[in-house]
Image (cartoon, rainbow, N blue to C red):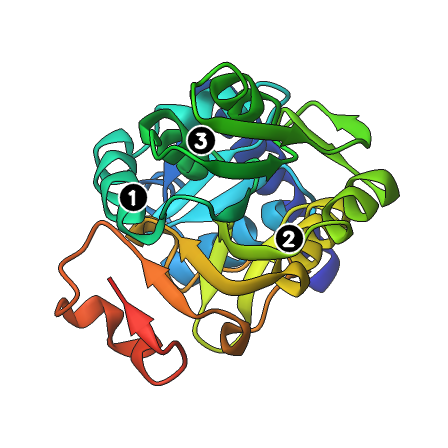
C-alpha cells in the first residue's frame, strides 16, 4: 500500500510539474481541488518543486523557474515593484557608493535612480546597462560567470570585484523571505554574491514584495539580523509585517 501511495504521489507531481511549466504558475487551492487531496499535500508537492529548482513559492501558490525567468519576473507584481523603487530612492544621496544585485525588484529601482555623483556596482547585466550611460552615475559591472536565469554574473570573480569596494549601502532583493529562516535563493552562486555585498556595505537594504513573505527556497542566504532596512510595497503599519518587526530595525 505504501509503495502504491508513493507511486501515486510521483505520478501526481509529474503531472503537476507539466502543468506548471505549461501555465507558468499554479494556485495551491485550485490544484488541491483538481486532485481531490488536502491542501497540505499539494503544499508538500510545491516544496519539492522548490527543492528541485523548478519552482518558486509565492503567496498561495508556486511559479515556474525557467531560462527566461528574469523577463517573466520583471512583469510579476509590477505595481509593487514600482512602489518599492520609489521608496528606495530616499536612501540614496550624492557621492554614495552603492551595490545593486541582479533582482528584478532592484532593476526597477535602477530604472528610477537619477541621483548624481554616485558610484554603483552591480552583478546584474540589465541593471548595469540601465546605469552606465546615465549622467552623474559611475557604474561598475562585476566580473564572473554568466548566469542566464537572472541575467547576472556570479562566482568567485563577481565576489572578488565586490570585495574591492567600501560601500555606503547595498540594495538587495531575494527569492524568498521567512521570519525564522531568513532570506533564501535558488542557487548558491547568488547567495555568495549577496553575502559579499552585505559584508562590504555599511547599510543593508532589502527590497521585497509581500508575495514572498513566509516562503523558503533551496539555499539559505542572509539572516534577518544582517538587514538594516526592509522595504516593501505595504504601509509600514500593515500587520503582515509584524513577523519581521522584532528582527529588522527599520521597516518602510
**Residue 156 place in picture, x, y as percent:** 87, 44
Secondary structure category for the residue under label 3: helix
At 59% from the left and 55% from the top, the residue drawn is 167
Q: For mark 2, what is the residue?
A: 194
Residues at marks 1 and 3, CA–CA distance in whole angstroms: 13 Å
Nearer the observer, 81 or 180: 81
Q: Earlier in the sequence, mark 2 or mark 3?
A: 3
Relative side of 162 to 130, left or right: right
Relative side of 174 to 34, left or right: right
Nearer the observer, 168 or 80: 168
Q: Mark 2 against mark 1, which lies toward the viewer?
A: 1
**Residue 28 in view (yes/no):** no
**Residue 130 in view (yes/no):** yes
**Residue 104 place in picture, x, y as percent:** 45, 32
Residues at marks 2 and 3, CA–CA distance in whole angstroms: 15 Å
- How would you rate the neighbour count of disc 1 (Cα within 10 Å): few for under 14, some for 14-19, many for 20 or more? some
Q: For mark 1, what is the residue?
A: 89
Residue 146 lies in quadrant: top right
Q: For mark 3, what is the residue?
A: 107
Secondary structure category for the residue under label 1: helix
Amino acid at each position: 500500500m505504501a509503495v502504491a501511495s508513493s507511486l501515486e504521489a510521483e505520478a501526481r507531481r509529474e503531472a503537476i510539474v507539466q502543468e506548471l511549466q505549461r501555465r507558468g504558475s499554479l494556485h495551491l487551492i485550485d490544484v488541491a481541488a483538481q486532485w481531490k487531496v488536502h491542501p497540505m499535500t499539494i503544499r508538500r508537492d510545491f516544496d519539492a518543486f522548490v527543492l528541485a529548482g523548478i519552482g518558486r513559492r509565492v503567496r498561495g501558490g508556486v511559479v515556474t523557474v525557467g531560462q527566461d525567468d528574469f523577463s517573466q519576473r520583471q512583469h510579476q507584481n509590477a505595481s509593487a515593484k514600482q512602489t518599492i523603487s520609489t521608496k528606495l530612492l530616499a536612501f540614496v544621496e550624492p557621492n554614495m557608493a552603492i551595490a545593486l544585485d541582479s533582482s528584478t525588484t532592484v532593476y526597477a529601482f535602477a530604472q528610477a535612480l537619477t541621483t548624481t555623483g554616485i558610484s554603483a556596482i552591480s552583478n546584474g547585466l540589465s541593471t548595469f546597462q540601465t546605469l552606465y550611460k546615465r549622467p552623474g552615475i559611475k557604474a561598475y559591472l562585476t566580473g564572473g560567470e554568466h548566469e542566464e536565469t537572472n541575467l547576472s554574473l556570479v562566482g568567485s570573480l563577481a565576489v572578488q570585484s565586490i570585495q574591492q569596494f567600501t560601500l555606503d549601502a547595498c540594495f538587495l532583493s531575494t527569492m524568498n523571505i521567512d521570519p525564522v529562516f531568513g532570506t533564501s535563493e535558488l542557487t548558491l552562486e547568488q547567495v555568495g554574491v549577496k553575502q559579499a555585498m552585505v559584508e562590504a556595505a555599511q547599510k543593508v537594504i532589502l527590497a521585497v514584495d509581500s508575495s514572498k513573505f513566509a516562503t523558503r527556497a533551496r539555499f539559505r542566504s542572509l539572516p534577518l539580523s544582517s538587514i538594516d532596512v526592509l522595504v516593501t510595497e505595504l504601509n509600514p503599519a500593515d500587520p503582515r509585517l509584524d513577523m519581521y518587526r522584532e528582527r529588522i530595525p527599520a521597516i518602510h
